[in-house]
Image: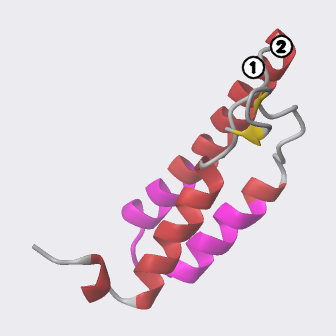
Amino acid sequence: MTRLTDLPGEVTHLLTVIVAALDIPLPSIEDSDEAARHAVLDERAAGVRIALSVLLGHPCSGDLEDTARYIRERTAEYPVTYTPFSDRRTGEDA
């Protein structure tokens, strides 16, 4: 099995970009925040799916950095604007 450290840097960079796009905070308990989180995550996941589908469907047409750039740009179009969950007992965000 190949370890992450054995992968080319471009691959680990792409994986890092994907995780950053999909790793968003939990919302507050307000219904509107939960709906907003769902919308942001859905749009970001769609961007990742599109980018990876293009990369896999047309491997000669683009490179990994182009794919990572597209995901970063698409992610920036859908920022987290809802209120993240905060544990009132500890004061920490989830």
Point 39% across, 60% down: residue: 57
Mark 1 is on which residue type? Glu
Q: Quadrant of residue 45?
A: top right
Helix, strand or loop under label 1: helix
Identify whether 52 is placed above or below 31: below
Label 1 crowd (10 A; few <14 / some 14-19 / many >=20): some
Span highlighted in magenta in the image: 50-73
Q: Main secondary structure of the magenta part?
A: helix
User: Do residues under tags 1 and 2 come within 8 Å of each other at their CB atoms?
Assistant: yes
Identify whether 55 is placed above or below 48: below
Left or right, residue 92 beside residue 80? left
Residue 7 coordinates in the image, percent (x, y)? 30, 84
Identify whether 71 is placed above or below 94: below
Residue 91 coordinates in the image, percent (x, y)? 80, 37
List the residue tagged with mark 1: 34
The count of marks equals 2
Q: Is residue 61 visible?
A: no
Point 45% across, 54% down: residue: 53
Residue 90 coordinates in the image, percent (x, y)? 73, 35
Mark 2 is on which residue type? Glu
Q: Which mark is residue 5?
A: none
Helix, strand or loop under label 2: loop
Queried whether the magenta region covers residue 44, the answer comes back as no
Depth check, mark 1 against mark 2: the one in front is 2
Q: Most extreme residue toward the top, as rendered?
A: 31
Q: Which mark is residue 30?
A: 2
Point 54% across, 60% down: residue: 18
Queried whether the magenta region covers residue 57, the answer comes back as yes
Q: Quadrant of residue 89?
A: top right
Label 2 crowd (10 A; few <14 / some 14-19 / many >=20): few
